[in-house]
Image (tube, coloured by chain):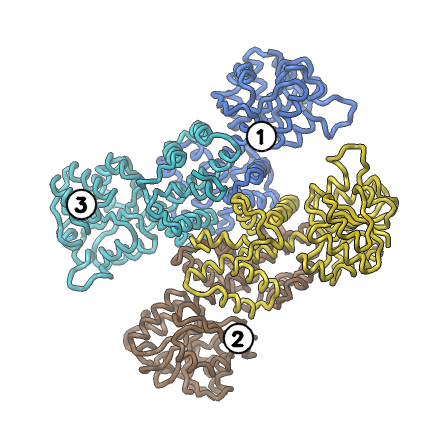
Chain colours: A brown, B yellow, C cyan, D blue
Amino acid sequence: MRLGFIGLGNMGQPMARNLICAGHDLIVYNRTRSRAEEIHVEGASVADSPADAARDVEALITMLADDHAVEEVVLGQSKTKETLSVLEALGHEAIHISMSTISVGLSQRLAEAHAMAGQFYIAAPVFGRPDAAAGARLWIVAAGPHDQIERCRSLFNAMGQGVFVVGNEPSLANTIKIAGNFVVASMIETLGEAFALVRKSGAEASQFLEIINALFKSPVYENYGRIIIEERYEPPGFKLKIGLKDMRLVLQSADTTATPMPLASLIYNHLLSAAAHGQGDTDWAALARIAAENAGLRK
Amino acid sequence: MRLGFIGLGNMGQPMARNLICAGHDLIVYNRTRSRAEEIHVEGASVADSPADAARDVEALITMLADDHAVEEVVLGQSKTKETLSVLEALGHEAIHISMSTISVGLSQRLAEAHAMAGQFYIAAPVFGRPDAAAGARLWIVAAGPHDQIERCRSLFNAMGQGVFVVGNEPSLANTIKIAGNFVVASMIETLGEAFALVRKSGAEASQFLEIINALFKSPVYENYGRIIIEERYEPPGFKLKIGLKDMRLVLQSADTTATPMPLASLIYNHLLSAAAHGQGDTDWAALARIAAENAGLRK
Amino acid sequence: MRLGFIGLGNMGQPMARNLICAGHDLIVYNRTRSRAEEIHVEGASVADSPADAARDVEALITMLADDHAVEEVVLGQSKTKETLSVLEALGHEAIHISMSTISVGLSQRLAEAHAMAGQFYIAAPVFGRPDAAAGARLWIVAAGPHDQIERCRSLFNAMGQGVFVVGNEPSLANTIKIAGNFVVASMIETLGEAFALVRKSGAEASQFLEIINALFKSPVYENYGRIIIEERYEPPGFKLKIGLKDMRLVLQSADTTATPMPLASLIYNHLLSAAAHGQGDTDWAALARIAAENAGLRK
Amino acid sequence: MRLGFIGLGNMGQPMARNLICAGHDLIVYNRTRSRAEEIHVEGASVADSPADAARDVEALITMLADDHAVEEVVLGQSKTKETLSVLEALGHEAIHISMSTISVGLSQRLAEAHAMAGQFYIAAPVFGRPDAAAGARLWIVAAGPHDQIERCRSLFNAMGQGVFVVGNEPSLANTIKIAGNFVVASMIETLGEAFALVRKSGAEASQFLEIINALFKSPVYENYGRIIIEERYEPPGFKLKIGLKDMRLVLQSADTTATPMPLASLIYNHLLSAAAHGQGDTDWAALARIAAENAGLRK
C-alpha cells in the first residue's frame, strides 16, 4: 500500500518503521526533518511538506502531538495559503487515519471536512508507550466506516497487537482513548495517595506495591508503581504536560456530554499545579509526587 | 494446634473450615449460635462465650465486622463484668491473631493490652472475598513479633495463598490493609466516571471495559467492571456500608499521620451519599452508580 | 451622546432605559424585535441589524448572553457576508463598550480587532441582578484606555452606583467579573452544605441563617440564604445554565494562567449535574439543592 | 451570681474579666496559674484545681481548647482518682455552661452525665475573635433547658452583643457553631482561589477585594481579605491547627448525620497539608496560601 505518514515523534517513528518492515511504501513528513531522514535510510521517501506526504497515497496516517498540530497540518488554518493543506492534497477516496490523541470535537470536524472532500476518515488512536510502539504491541482503537477499517487492517496489524473497532462514528474512538487515559491517570493518583499514607504510617511503599501486584496482577500497576517508588520521572516516557492536555480533553468531553467527573477534575488540578511548578516535561507519573508533597514528604 | 476462632460470618466461617481441614483443633464462638453449629458438625467445639473460646488455646483468631465488635469481644468494654473478656481469659504466651479489618488505632491499643497481659498479638488482615476464603486463596498481610508469625505460618497456609510479613509493629498490617481497600475503591470510582462518560458519548461501556482489560490484564478490573456494567449490586459480595467504614479508617489514618488524601475524601463522600439514600446493604461497587446518576443516566 | 445599544434582555433593557432617562440619544437592536419596540416608546430608535446600531454612533454598548452571541454580533463569524458586522460598521475612533460577561480570551480578541480597525474597546462587565439594573445600582468594573473610560463615565453613572477602573488591559475587567461570580457561587455551595448539615442534625436552617447574618452582615448572604431556605428557584433571577457558563469561564482562565481552583471545579461539577437533570433554567441558587439531595433530604 | 470559670486563654480571660466588671463573684482556674493570677488582681479568687472552681458555685463556665481538655477537666478521665472531677464537685442544680467549641458527640455525653448527677448543662459556644471577647461583642449560640438559659441571660449579656437560643437539646448549639466556622473557612478558601486567579491574570488582588467589599458589604470579608492580601498570618488571631480541629468536628457531624460535605473535605485536606508543613501555629487564614502555592505563586 502506498502510504503517507506525518509525525515522527517518539511514537510515530517506530510506527512508521513497522509499516516499512511490513512491506508498505511510505512517504514521510516531520517538521524537524532530521527525524524523517532517519526513516529514509530504512526505505521511506521524505516529503517536503505535509501536502507532499498526502498526495497520491492510498492512506495517510497522522501521529501528532495535539489538536493544534493536527488542525494546522490537516486543515491548514495557521498556514499561509501558498502551500496546500493535507485536506486539499489528499486524493478522492483516499483515507486519513488519525492516530493522534485529539479531542472528540476536532475528530468530528475532521470527519465532516473529509466527507465534504470526498475522502474517508478513520480515528484510530493507540494505547502504549514508545517501547510498545517499537515492538508492534500497541492496542489500536478504531472507529469509522466499516469497510474502510477493513481496508486498513493490515496496517493496524503491522503496528499493534490488536484492534478494537468501536463504531461507525470516528469520534467514538477518541472518546474511548481519552477515557482510557483517565483510567491510567486515576491509578497514578491512587498510588500516589496510598504510598503517601503507607510511608507516613511507617510502612514500606515497595512492600505495599508487592501486595497490590499480588492482588491486581496488572503490568500497568507494576510498571507505574515501580516508576513512582523509584521516582524515575526523568527522562519522561510520557510527558506530564501531554497528560495534562489529555485530562483537558476528558473534561471537554465531560462538559459537552454533561457528565460530572470529579475525579478527573481532581487529577487535572494536580497536574495543573505540577505544570505551574515547571514540571511539565517530567513523566506524568510525577502526578504521584503531589500527594507526597502535600503530606510534607521529601524525596 | 488448639485454636479458638471468634466470628463466623461470610469470611470467618470458610476460614475456620479450612483450619479444621488442615487438622487443627478448633473451639468456635459466634454471636448467632446457629452459624457455630454449622461448623460443629465438621468437628469444632462450640463455645458459650468469647472467653470460653479463648481459654486454654494456643492461638485465638478473631474475624469480626468492625472496631466496635472487636473491642467488645476482646476488651469487653460494653459487657457486664460478670463474664470475662477475651483478654482476661486468654492464657499467658497465647497469641491473639486479629484478622478483622480494624483501625490502626485499635490495633495499637490491642498490642499494648496483650503485652501487658503477657500475651502475644499479631495483626493479620486479609484480602479476598468469601469465595477466596472458601478456596483458601486469601492474601494475608501479617505484622507482629517475627517468631510468633513463624509459629502461626501453618495456620496462614491453611487459609491463604500467600502471607506478606510487613513488620514487627502489628498496626502496620492494618495500615496496609486499609490502603489496599482504598486502591480498590478508587478503581470503582474511576470505572464509574469513565463508564458514565463513555455511555453519554454514545459508546458502549462493555466495549470500553474490554479495552481496559486488554491494557490492565487485571482480574480485579475484569470482575468489578462486569459487576458495574451488569449492575449486579444485590446480593452484595461486600457491603457498601462496610466499604464506607473502611474509607473512614483510611481517613482516620490519614488524619493521624497528616496525609491529605483528596481522592479518599471524594470516595468517602460518594459512599456516604449512597448510604444516606439507603444503599448501605448493596455491594460497594454501587459506588459507580453515583457517577451515572450525577450524569443523569438512568439504569 | 449618540449611542448604540445591542442586547435588550433582563439586564440590557433597564440599562438602556436609564441611559435614555439620562438624556442620551439611543439606537437599539435586539434579536427579538418586540423588546426593542418597548424601548422605542421611551424615545429610542430601533435598528434593523446590529450593524445599523453601530453606524454613526459615538459609543456602542453590547449586553449579550455569552461569547457566542458577542462573537456573532461583533465579529460576524456566523453571519452571511451580505450584512456587515458591527466591527465593519462602527466608525473610526468610536468606542465599543462590552458589558456582557464574556471570556478573557474573547475580550482579548475584541481588543485586538478594534485596535486594528482604528476603534476603541472597553470591557465593562457589571455586578447586579435585574432589579439593580433597573435602579441604576449596578457595580461596573471597567478596563481599557484611561481617557476612553473617562469619556464614558457619564454613561456608567447613568447605569450604576459605582465604577471600578482596574487597568488599561480590557480583559482584566473580565477576569475580575468572573472571579466575582465565583465568590458568589462558592457562597451558595457553602450555604447548601451548611444548611444540609444543620437540618440533618435537627436544627433549623432559618435560625442558622439568622446567625450567619449577624456575623457576616452581608445582604448577599441574606438574600441568597433566604432564596435557598424557601427554595425559590423559579422563576429564576439568574439562570443556573448561565452560572454554569460563568464557571466554565473561570476554569478557562484558571487553565490559561495555570491556577488550580479545586473549589471552582467542585462547583462546576455540581452545576453540571444539575444541568444534566434538566435544571438549567432554574435559579443558580439551586446549586444548594445538590448538597441537600446528596444528604438524602427531600424538599 | 457566684461563678466558677475554667480556661483563661485568649478568649476566656477577657470573658472572665467582663463577668467581674458586671459584678459577678468569680473563682477561676487555669492550668497555667499565672494567667489566673492576672484575673485575681481584678477581684477573682484563684482555685487550685478544676474541682475547686466548681464547688459551691451557682454556675460553672468552661472555655477550653478542645474535646480532650473539656473531657479531662469535666469528666476527669485522664486524672488520678485522688482529685475530684468537676462533675463530682459541682453541686446539685448547679449549671455547667460549656462555651468551648467542642464536638456534638461530647456535648451529648456531657448532657447525659450532668443529668445523671442532678445538674444542669447548657452549651453556649461563641463567635468572635479575642478583640470581640474583650469588647463584650461576642455572639453567643445557646441551647439547653429554656429556664436555665433564662437564668444565665445576665451572664451572656455581660460577655456578648447577642444570644441566639437554638433549642432544648444542648448539642444543637455545637452543631451551629461548627457549621458557622465552616462558612468562614469556605470564605477563606474562596478568597484564596480567587486571589490566585486574579494575581496570575495580572490584576491586583487588593482592587478585587475592594469590589468584593462593595458587593458583599461584610466586615468578615473585609477583615479576612485584608489579612490574606497582607499575608498577616503571624501572630495568629485564630490558629490554623484549631481551625483544622474544627473542620474535623464538622466532618464528624457530617459523618454521624450522613451529610456529604465535599467542600468541607476540600478545606480539611488543605488545612491538613498546611499542618503537615508545620504551619499549625499560623493564623488559619493561611489556608488561602495553599491556593497561591499550588498556582506557583511565591510571596
Query: How would you rate the neighbour count of disc 1 (Cα within 10 Å): few for under 14, some for 14-19, many for 20 or more?
Result: many
In screen coordinates, is D290 left or right of B220? left
Question: Could you tell me which chain the residue with mark 1 belongs to?
Answer: D
Q: Is residue C202 above or below residue C283?
A: above
Q: Are marks 1 and 3 on the same chain?
A: no
Q: Residue A38 at x, y = what percent?
A: 49, 83
Q: Secondary structure at mark 1?
A: loop
Q: Residue tagged by mark 1?
A: D101
Chain of the residue under the numbered disc 2 shown in the image: A
Q: In the picture, residue B71 is in which quadrant? A: top right
Quarter location, residue A105: bottom left
Q: Determine whether, in the image, residue A254 is placed left or right of residue B72.
A: left
Label 2, on which residue? Answer: A138
Quadrant containing the N terminus of chain C is top left
Q: Which secondary structure lies at badge 3?
A: helix
Question: Where A155 sits versus D259, above or below?
Answer: below
Q: Which residue is mark 3?
A: C35
- The reply, left or right, for residue D159 in relation to residue C56 is right
